[in-house]
Each structure stands twice: as C-alpha cells, then as structure tokens.
Image (cartoon, rainbow, N blue to C red):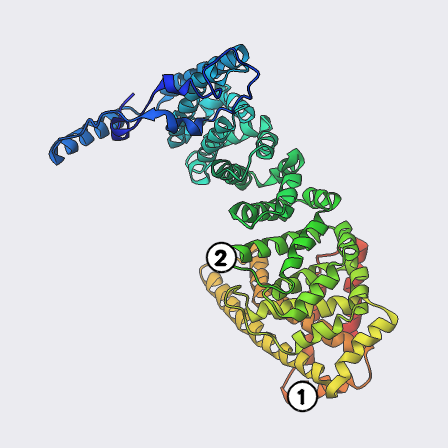
Amino acid sequence: MALNVGELLAYQPDRESIAKRGHDDDDDDDLDRPVRKARIRDVDRYRKPAPAQTAGMSEEEKAVILEKLEQEDDMETLDEAALKRMILTFEKRVYRNQEMRIKYPDNPERFMESELELHDTIQELHVIATAPELYHHLVELNAVQSLCQMLNHENTDISIALVDLLQELTDVDTLNESEEGADALIEALLDAQVFGMLVTNLDRLDESVKEEADGVHNTLGVIENILEFKADRAHDAAQQGLMPYLLKRIKAKMPFDANKLYCSEMLAIILQNSEETREQLGELDGIDTLLQQLATFKRHNPANSEELEMMENLFDCLCSALMLPANRDRFLKGEGLQLMNLMLREKKMSRNSALKVLDHALTGPEGVDNCTKFIDILGLRTIFPLFMKTPKPNKKIGRMKEEHEEHVVSIIASLLKNVKSNQRQRLLNKFTEADHAKVDRLMELHFKYLDKVGAVDAQIEREKVALRRQGEDVDEPMEEEFYLRRLNTGLFTLQLLDYIMLEICSTGPASIKPRVMQILNLRGGSIKAIRNIIREYAANVGDAKSTETKEAEQQRLLSLVDRF
C-alpha cells in the first residue's frame, strides 16, 4: 500500500509500551487489582517520535517525494479485487480480536494489540466511500452485517470508528453518485436492524467525553442520511428505540449543546410524515416532554441562534404531533393551550410559533374541545389584538406578515366552526365592539388579499395563453399546480376571511351585515366575487376525515353563500 507524507512524519507506535496499559503495575498475576478500561484514543500517550526523516532536505527534494507519493496513490485505485482484499483483512482482524478477548478477558494489555490493528483497518475502509458503485459488492460479501456487528464491540472506540465509517459511506452526496450501489447498501443496513444497533450504542456513550459526544452526533448523522434516502422508514427508526432515546436526551438536565439541537431536529424529521411515530410520541408522553421544554421560552428568548433553532424544531414537532386527534386530547390535558396563550401575551420570540401551534390545535372537527377551552381561558382577549394589528416581523426568525395573518384568521375561522351556544355568542359579539372595528379590519384584509390573488390570477392566465399558443394543453396536474400557487400567494387566507365574513353576517348581530355592505359599496367590492371564492373553497375542502363530514362542510359553506 502506498505511503504518504503523513506516515513519513508520523509517530510510530511502541507496541511494548502499549502492552503496559492494562493494570496499574506489571504484575500479570495480580487480578485483584481493578482493571482500567482500554481505550484506543489513549494510545498516543505511549507513542515515541520516529527520527525526523525529512531533516536536512531541501524544498525541491520534498517536492519530488510528494510528487512520487501522489503518483503512487493515483496508480492504486480501488476495484473489486482490492475491495475483497480489504474486507478479508477486516474479517481477519475482527476474528483475531474476538479470539484474544475470549482468551484474555481480564488482561486488556494482551488484546490491545489486536484492537489497534482492528481500529486501523476500519480507518482504511473509509476509501470505499470514494467508490459507491462498489457498494453492492459489500453486500454480496456480507460485509455490511459484519460492520454492523462492530457497533456492539465492547470498546466504544471501535464502535465510534464504525459510526464514522457508516456516516461517510451513507453521505447523501455519495449515495447519489450510484443509485444501484446506494439501494443495495441502505437495504442491507436496514435488514441488519442498523437503527436498533446504533441506538443501543448511543445508550452507552458518555457525552462528558468529547470523543463519545462526537460519536453521538455522528450516529444521528448516519440515521439522518438513511432517512433522507428512505424517508418512509422513519417509523422503523422510531420503533427500534430512536424515539425513546430522543425524548430522553431532549429532556435530560444537561447544558444546551449541539447534540440536543440535533436530537430536536431528528425528532422533527421522524414526526414529519409518519402517523405511527406521532402515535408513539403520544404514548411515550412526548407531548408533555415538548411542552415542558418549550415552557422555558415562555418568558425568555433563546440565548443564541442555535437555541432558537432548537426551539423552532420543538414547535415543529408539536405541530406534527397535533395532526393526530389523540394528541389533541393530550395537548389539552397537558395545559398546552394555556402555555401557548401565555406565549402570545408575553411577546417573546416564541409568540409566532405558539400561534402556529394554536392553529394546528384548533383546526377541524377534532379541535372542538380545544376551541371551547381556548375561549374559557380568555383566549379571545389574546387573539383579537393580534388580528387588529399584525406585529412587525422578527428579523431573527424571519417570518412574514402574511404568515402571521394566515394563522390568526385560521384560528378565528376554526372558533366560528367549532364553538356553540354562549361561547359562540361571545365570539360574535367581538365584531360589534368599538363601533365594529373588527369588521372594518376584516374588510381591510379582504381587499388586501383580493388584490394579491387578482395579481397572481392575471399572471397565471397569461401563462395559460402562452402555453396554448405553443400548442400545449393545460392538463389537470398543471391546473393543480396553478391552484397551489394561488393558495400560497394568499387565496387560502382570502377564503378564510370571506368565510368569516359570511358567517358573522348570517349568524351574528343584525348590525354586522349592513356594515359589511356599506364597506363593499364604498370600496367597489363585489358580492359575486365573494360568492365565487367561497364556492371554490367548498369545492376544494379536503381536510375532512370522512366523506360524510366533507359533504356536510360543503353544504354548510354553500348555504352561507345562498343566505348572503
């Protein structure tokens, strides 16, 4: 194998010195003394410097040596035969280490030599990451299974070295270079229950030791790489112990660090598109864990950008979890509404995200109980000031006014849909306060978003004309894409605003509708346009869980149009 300049100048291991690490003295027969844990990372303490072989060399001579070494490296390319030799060497080192550990279980100095060789061999395997097209040979040689087994090695230095190797092999950019090789490797890792083995290794790492803390971070990196390539396997990761580990690590009473941030990010990833993981989170009291961690930011802003990112991740986790109806109940019992309401009043950085969580908690038929409770805890006193005046965007968070307005309007619309009797009357009466100031604000927002949607509609129409001139048809997928563009530009907010308008005109105090009509006439508004917006909204209602509920919601919207 080719030498490199690092090896010319490196320290060489003094194997005789290494063998003296096992006990506090040299007496091999004295087994009553406590055995010190062997650590490969301590080996540098026993290395002796080799003579400086480049001493006295001129710069030209050093350049010649460098050039020769680079040429030699270029000649030694990794191919199938070289890969097989490397795997065979690795297997031999594994077998030798196991043999020595079984033969001398109480004498680390006797098996340390084989452990060093195994560690060095694992480092040499990193070159495989430069040839992802050969990954399928790793699978055929059953090497993936052997590599994963090393995650359970008694020496955490070996398991951490394996984690580093797996992180490099599963790097997303590397996987994208060879789809066939990537599929083979990832499937083999999943068949070997790699998630469970990685989590088992995580549980024994001591984060007070820097190398092991780095090992935790790199382990999460391996899991993220695999899930980025196979997003549908998030449930497998959660079931194999990742979910309990993440929750335990997030709520651990430790100073904030990069690993806690990474755990919050991983939790958000596995909750994003999996109903099973949301259910598991609820069963593990994860809603309470998230609320406890977020309570820190009720009256205090995050200390830095990393802690801000973690806070946002935890809010995202809560939003994902609330998409499961059972978690809405857990959120209600855990006093999540009270916490979000307090955050809205405190005006800290957490306010915008608390608004988003409230939106998720109150929306749809599953939000009835939360809507009722929100009015009971005087939530109307919190939400309507935010409706009347949109706060200035926070530069650190980067949220836009439109996002804030969408959440506020959505919350008010959910309350109108879900509350009954006296609470509903309290909500409707809000629109008559201060000489119908909230009706005026509602109409102001209506015209703002009507203009935004009108502009994007005109742009889309021009694009359709251009497509037809080129002889292309505007098919259904293209129409869906156009509709999504309209929603993202403000159509969804406009639909909710007009729904609120029709609802309060039909069921609210008698003075509301004349005020709405007066403002429409003054601003040149169109009743027909409002009806068309609500009809389109009814035609695309898609958040209902059953056909019957969906049809009932459509009929309710259309009846409001007829009454208006």
Alpha-carbon neighbours of circle 1 within 10 Å: few (<14), some, or many (≥20)?
few
Q: Amino acid at mark 1?
A: Asn
Residue at the image position 60 percent from the left and 67 percent from the top: 348
Alpha-carbon neighbours of circle 2 within 10 Å: few (<14), some, or many (≥20)?
few
| 132 over 556 or under it: above or below | above
Q: Earlier in the sequence, mark 1 or mark 2?
A: 2
In this figure, which residue is indicated by the disc labeled 1?
521
Q: Quadrant location of the N terminus? A: top left
Q: Which mark is residue 166?
A: none
In this figure, which residue is indicated by the disc labeled 2?
472
Q: Is residue 87 visible?
A: no
x and y percent of residue 308 in the render?
Answer: 55, 58
Q: Residue furthest right?
A: 421
Q: Quadrant location of the C terminus? A: bottom right
Q: Along the line of sight, which residue is nearer the eye, 27 or 13?
A: 27
x and y percent of residue 398 in the render?
Answer: 52, 65
Q: Amino acid at mark 2?
A: Glu
| 555 over 518 or under it: above or below | above
